[in-house]
Amino acid sequence: MPTKPLILVLNCGSSSVKFSLFDTDETGELLEIQSGLAERLGQPEAQLKLRAKKETDTLEIAEADHERAITTILDRLRDDGLFERIVGIGHRVVHGGEFFSGPTTIDDDVLNQIESCNRLAPLHNPANVVGIQLTQKMLPGKPNVAVFDTAFHQTLPASAYRYAVPNSWYTDLGVRKYGFHGTSHQYVSSVAAQQLDLQTAGVLTAHLGNGCSAAAVVNGTSVDTSMGLTPLDGLVMGTRSGSVDPGLHQYVATQLGIDVAAVTASLNAESGLLGLSEVSNDMRTLIEAEGDGDVNASLAIEVFCYRLAKELAGLTVALPHLDVLAFTGGIGENSSAIRKRTVDLLGVLGFEIDDVANSQNGSESNGFIHAASSVPILVVETAEEQMIAAQTLNTVAL
Ligand code: ADP
């Protein structure tokens, strides 16, 4: 039996590495055959979980950094005799600046451009570069493709991406809205348009995971989104504040006698659901805590839903018509309570939830959750790894 080509997808986060290995066939169908997650990199508890054929293998890799974690993953794939079958490696790259509006085969120039974006995403892009350099070294001659979180949002009009700051900050420093989670917003908006069989579609998407963002998408083109220059902007997230008054930085820095970098670090790591609740950054835990009467957890959820509804309402001005709202990400797919509380704030836009459909739909069953008279609302399981694999396969096949 001839062996089928494989696509490897590598997703290097700030303290984690995810990988997926996809089988391909002549129809372009992709089937995940192995996956893995290395977490808490740099800490004594660092761990690598590998999953193949429904079996999970856990390796303790104390203090491992990105390089060691990725090397361990690649060594395992080589020992399993899978290297020869890999025809392309797709890398999730968080920031592509204004250089990239689609998946791109990586050569020296492209890698230099990705590295030049490190200053815009210092927590994320350097890890992406390590991943690329390692696969270049360990799988020589195999094409590497970068799939950028920012690329889908490169179609935003200037009225949406420019900030009202000195022009030279944009021209000299690249200060503008870039937007993130592009792969997810692209996939989810296209599924929503397909499900409704829309020829022209005005779609709102809400990607709600540890990081959260919303987007307005018209006929498959992103026209506005909530994240900005960095993934700190916009919605309330697990540990990230989302939008705050730009005057806050100086006020807090002066009052606490700390520098702006320390304020930014707190806004990234100690804010959001965690900061408000002082309980957890995890929505499941907060919903449980609210059930037990924790008022801070309740407030955190209230703020999360209010800010999300307000952002979605704001994004409608970018749409010629409003056809569907789609929820995705760990919270969007699994939490009927968060979907309900958010949609209940959006009645003025014609949204109304159907409680039965809402409680029955989730990651196991994508589906509509709106009442008969409502603008359609849909739950879609996101498929970022699959999208990266598909875009990599297309790019290497060109
Ligand atoms: P990441 O952005 O790291 O990929 P996920 O998309 O997995 O994260 O989302 C993680 C979030 O989803 C966490 O806040 C988690 O509590 C939340 N979540 C997962 N399942 C549920 C659930 N059943 N109810 C509420 N929240 C959930």
Image (tube, rainbow, N blue to C red):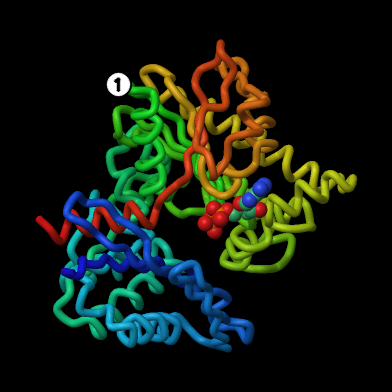
Give the residue displayed 24% in from the left and 85% down from the top.
137
Residue 209's place in the image compared with 352, above or below, is below
Residue at 90% in and 45% down: 293
Label 1: element kind:
loop
Three-letter amino acid code of the residue under disc 1 = Thr
Which residue does the numbered mark 1 point to in the structure image? Answer: 200
Q: Is residue 388 left or right of residue 339?
A: left
Disc 1 packing (10 Å; few <14; some 14–19; many ≥20):
few
Q: Residue lying furthest top in this view? A: 373
The quarter of the rendered structure image containing the C terminus is bottom left
Q: Quadrant location of residue 341?
A: top right
Q: Nearer the viewer, residue 158 or 133?
A: 133
Residue 91 lies in quadrant: bottom left
Residue at position x 36%, y 70% from top? 128
Of residues 255 and 312, the one nearer the viewer is: 312
Image location of residue 58, percent across then percent down: 55, 80
Q: Which of these two is toward me, 281 or 8?
A: 8
Name the residue at the front extreme: 1
